[in-house]
Amino acid sequence: MEELTKEQAIADIAEKLNIQKDKILYIEHSDLFQINDCVIPVIADNIKVFQEYNLYFYRCTIPNLILEITTKSLEFKMCCFESSFIIRNNFDGYISIQDSIFEKDFGIF
């Protein structure tokens, strides 16, 4: 990814997830954006960010996530899902969850 495009993508992700740009790293060989140590306030309003970028969340707190769209690659490591994490039957994409905590609901429908 070109430097200018990478910086534009980081700014776009930061805006859509309402996080600081310095919490996002671009991993060139994997073509993914790593998001570190963040509280992701609201995802439902900007769920399309998952369709546009390969995202890797590391040590993030996520209040509520419902996946029912086609996504690119989503990876979560050492994250805390505070409210609910739901994957609906029309979800299409790759997801990996490692060493994460689900404080309330987890469902695949």
Image: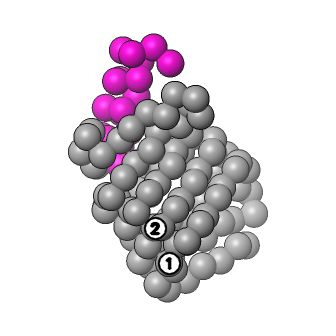
Instruction: Read off the residue under disc 2.
Output: 79
Circle 2 residues within 10 Å: few <14, some 14–19, many ≥20:
many
Left or right position of 40 against 32: left
Pointers 2 and 1 in contact (CB under 8 A)?
yes
Q: Is residue 81 visible?
A: yes
Instruction: Read off the residue under disc 1.
Output: 101
Left or right position of 19 against 67: left
Residue 34, compared with residue 9, is above or below; it is below
Q: Which residues are magenta?
A: 1-17
Determine whether the residue tagged by mark 2 lies in a helix, strand or loop: loop
Q: Please identify the quadrant where the C terminus is shown.
A: bottom right
Residue 61, compared with residue 8, is above or below; it is below
Amino acid carrying label 1: it is: Ile
Asked which quadrant contains residue 25, the reply is top left
Predominant secondary structure in magenta? helix
Q: How far is mark 2 from mark 1, CA to CA?
A: 6 Å
Residue 14: x %, y % from top left = 32, 41
Residue 35, compared with residue 58, is above or below; it is above
- Is 100 covered by the magenta stretch? no
Amino acid carrying label 2: it is: Cys
Residue 24: x %, y % from top left = 35, 41
At 74% across and 57% down in the image, what residue appears? 90
At 44% across and 73% down in the image, what residue appears? 80
Asked which quadrant contains residue 15, the reply is top left
Residue 39: x %, y % from top left = 31, 62
Report the residue that reaches farthest toward the front: 29
At 45% across and 14% down in the image, what residue appears? 2
> Could you say which is closer to the camera, residue 72 or residue 88?
72
At 70% across and 55% down in the image, what residue appears? 91
Circle 1 residues within 10 Å: few <14, some 14–19, many ≥20:
some
- Is 4 covered by the magenta stretch? yes
- Which of the two discs, 2 and 1, labels the residue nearer the N terminus? 2
